[in-house]
Each structure stands twice: as structure tokens, then as C-alpha cells.
Amino acid sequence: MKNIVLTAMAASAVLVSCGTVQSLVQNTFPYTTNVLVSTGVPADKEVSSTATATNVQTWFGGNNNAKIKDVRISDAKVSIVSPAGGNLSAFKSVKIYVSSTGTNERLIASRSNISTNSSSLNLDLNDTGFLDEIVKSSGLTVRTVYELKNQTTSDMNIKVALNFSSVPAK
């Protein structure tokens, strides 16, 4: 019995230490942008807003030799910045695409049939494979496409927050 307990404790220690090492070497880097939804945006029509991800580029500088690999989207969230107390009930759908100079655009996160009165919403992540080529290239662009259920009565500012994860390359 004593051997079983000791073996279980040793196995637990090994598993915990492996998870700790993985969390130490795995990198997560954020990207945020704000999207203005003006009162003139019609309902039931997709509208697009594009932003250049300069903060991601400062980490890698458009450097294809950056010492990271296996870049994936790990989290995507939209939230209301203004008006204060606003919610996402006017939205029908949201899609987030990424691309960079010389790469094709890829859908990384989306949510359809939005039915929430919440001020924030986690998007469904698309399994796009690795995004190394896009993130490590220059001119990383994030395009937000949204569709409203009904026209808003005031301008809205929404924040798009993305987290990418990677591991160090050799």
C-alpha cells in the first residue's frame, strides 16, 4: 500500500512539473483594437472594419526569423467600451479575420445568432491551424466583420481582444 501511495505521489509530481515547464515556455501575446459602430450602420448588412496590428509587430518586427512557432489563436472576445452600460443585443454576428502582406486572409473567430444582453462575449475559435506565417510577416491586419439585428440609436465602440499562443522555436 505504501508503494502505491509513493508511486501516485511521484507520478503527480512529474505531471505537475511537466505542466509547469510547458506554461513557462509557452508564450501568449495579446492584440486589441476598437471598432466604431455608428448609428448610420444599416441592419442585416455585413460591415467591415480593418486595423493594422502594430502592437503585435513590435514583438516580432515582421521578422520571419522570430524564435517562435506553432502560433494559434487562443482566445477572442468582443466587449462594449461605450456607451457605458451598453450591451451586445444589437449584434447578429461577428467574425474576425487575420492576414498579412503576401498571405491569404483567414477566419480565426466568429459568433453567429448572437442573443445576449451582456456587455462582453467570447467568440468561437476556428481551427485555422498554425498562424506562424501571418503573425511573423509584416503588415499584420485584423478585419472585424459584423452584422446588426437592428440599427443602433447611438454610436457604439466595441473592443476586440485577441490572444495568440506560441512556443519557442529552436
Image: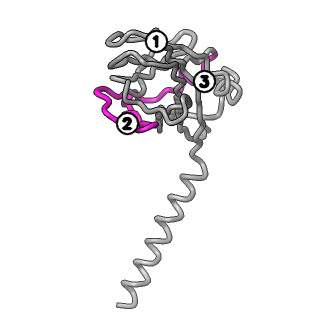
Question: Magenta residues, as a range?
Answer: 111-138
- The residue that label 2 is drawn on is 117
Q: Which mark is residue 48?
A: 1
In the image, what residue occupies the spot 52% across and 32% down? 162
**Callout 2 amino acid:** Asn
Label 2 neighbourhood size at 10 Å, few (<14), some (14-19), many (20+)? few
Furthest-bottom residue in this view = 2
- Residue at 37% from the left image edge and 18% from the top image edge: 148
Q: How many marks?
A: 3
Amino acid found under the numbered disc labelled 1: Ser
Position of residue 138 relative to residue 164, above or below, is above
Secondary structure, mark 3, is helix
**In the depicted structure, whether residue 18 falls above or below residue 43:** below
Pointer 1: residues within 10 angstroms few (<14), some, or many (20+)? some
10 Å crowding of disc 3: few (<14), some (14-19), many (20+)? many
| Residue at mark 3 to residue at mark 1: CA–CA distance | 24 Å
Left or right: 4 in relation to 30: left
Question: Mark 3 = which residue?
Answer: 136
